[in-house]
Image (cartoon, rainbow, N blue to C red):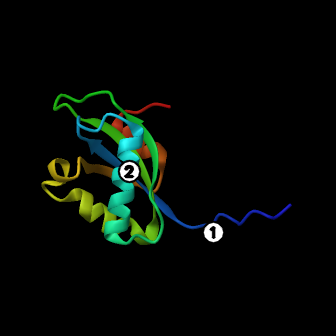
Amino acid sequence: MARRLSKALRGKRRWIGIQISADISSRAKLKSIIETIASELELSTMPKLMDFDQRVYSNGCGTGIIQVKLPDYNKLREYLSSANSLHQIGMSSLTSSGKIRLVRERLSVVN
C-alpha cells in the first residue's frame, strides 16, 4: 500500500462560494459550465463542484461551492467576480476561503 503524502506536500486548494442563476437547474448543467470556463481560462486542473444548493435567495439565485487548486485561484476568482458574470455565465463569486467549512458557514449551508 502506497504511503499518503504529508499535508505539507499535498496540493493547496481554495473553495469559492458562488451565486448561481435560476436558469441553472441541475448539477450536470453547472458542471458543464464550469468545464467550459476551465478550458476558456486554461486552468491547470479542472475545478471540482462540491456543493450545489437550489434553495433560492430573494433574487432568485441558488448557491454552490467550487474547489480550485491554488495556482488557478486568482484567475478563476477574478473571472467570477466581474460585475456582469451572473448574467453572462450564470454564476458569480460571493466568498472564498482555504477552509470549506468557512465557505459553508458564510453561505449558510449546513452539511
How crowded pointer 1 is (Cα within 10 Å; few <14, some 14-19, many 20+) is rated as few
Name which residue type carries label 1.
Ala
Residue 8 - label: 1
Query: Label 1 to label 2, Cα distance in Å?
Result: 32 Å
Residue 73 at x, y = what percent? 38, 65
Q: Amino acid at mark 2?
A: Ser
Asked which secondary structure carries label 1, the reply is loop
* Element carrying mark 2: helix
Q: Is residue 57 left or right of residue 17?
A: left
Between 70 and 61, the one nearer to me in the picture = 61
In this rendering, the answer to whether 49 lies above or below 45 is above
The one of 42 and 66 positioned closer to us in this rendering: 42
> In the displayed structure, does residue 88 sit left or right of residue 62?
left
Q: Point out residue 46 in the picture as x, y percentages from the top left corner.
A: 46, 61
In the current view of this chain or complex, which residue is farthest to the right? 1
| Residue sitting at x 19%, y 31% | 60
* Disc sitting over residue 32 in the figure: 2
Tell me the residue at 32%/63% (across/down). Answer: 76
